[in-house]
Image (spheres, rainbow, N blue to C red):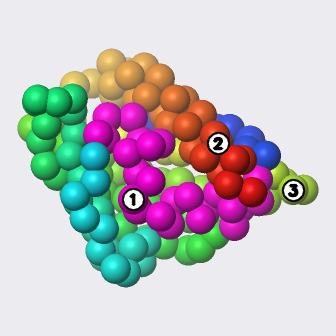
Amino acid sequence: MTTVRRTIAATPEQVWDVLADGWLYPLWVVGASRMRDVDDQWPAAGAKLHHSVGAWPLLLDDETEVLESRPPTLLELRARAWPSGEAHVRIRLEAVAEQTHVALEEDAASGPARLVPAPLRAPGLHWRNVEALRRLAYLAERRR
């Protein structure tokens, strides 16, 4: 898995509030372009976000499912982005004084992206998730 870390100037509960609002998903997840629906149980295990990926007019409808949820410290997801495949994503939050240390881990779980060797997948995932954590920080820090 590729891991990216960032310290956010907000409490774990404040960061979790952004993660728990499924309608904000395309604001911080690079590649997600719009939300179509959010299950009422989000972010409980088994709940799904129904989103689109890509850029208009080349949008593909897909979904992301919660595998494990431990508020406000862990959110584990299976993110679908076909035709490239599915990704396994783990977001860990750790309190550090009045801030939160966030670790975002991701790797291809299935589909054609899994055929790309890990050393070739890693740079793209790293770049994408550095930007995702930057966006997550903007949202959490400004909602206080």
Residue 47, given in percent of the width and then of the height, sits at 31, 74
Q: Viewer-nearest of labels 2 and 1?
A: 1
Query: Label for residue 96?
Result: none
Q: Viewer-nearest of labels 1 and 3?
A: 1
**Relative to 136, does residue 36 appear above or below in the rendering?**
below
Label 1 to label 3, Cα distance in Å? 26 Å
Q: Quadrant of the C terminus?
A: bottom right
Q: Main secondary structure of the magenta part?
A: helix
Q: Residues within 10 Å of mark 3 (few under 14, many from 20)?
A: few
| Tag 2 near tag 1, CB within 8 Å | no
Q: Which residue is mark 3?
A: 98
Q: Secondary structure at mark 2?
A: helix
In the drawing, does residue 75 fall left or right of residue 79?
A: right
Give the residue drawn at x 28%, y 54%. 35
Q: Which residue is mark 2?
A: 137
In the drawing, does residue 59 fall left or right of residue 93?
A: left
Q: Quadrant of the N terminus?
A: top left
In the drawing, does residue 118 fall left or right of residue 50?
A: right
Give the residue drawn at x 47%, y 64%. 21
Mark 2 residue type = Ala
Q: Nearer the viewer, residue 61 or 102?
A: 61
Mark 1 residue type = Trp
Label 2 to label 1, Cα distance in Å? 16 Å
| Tag 2 near tag 3, CB within 8 Å | no
Query: Label for residue 23?
Result: 1
Magenta part of the protein: which range? Answer: 10-33
Q: Nearer the viewer, residue 49 or 93?
A: 49
In the drawing, does residue 97 fall left or right of residue 112?
A: right
Based on the picture, tell me whether residue 18 belongs to the magenta stretch: yes
| Tag 1 near tag 3, CB within 8 Å | no
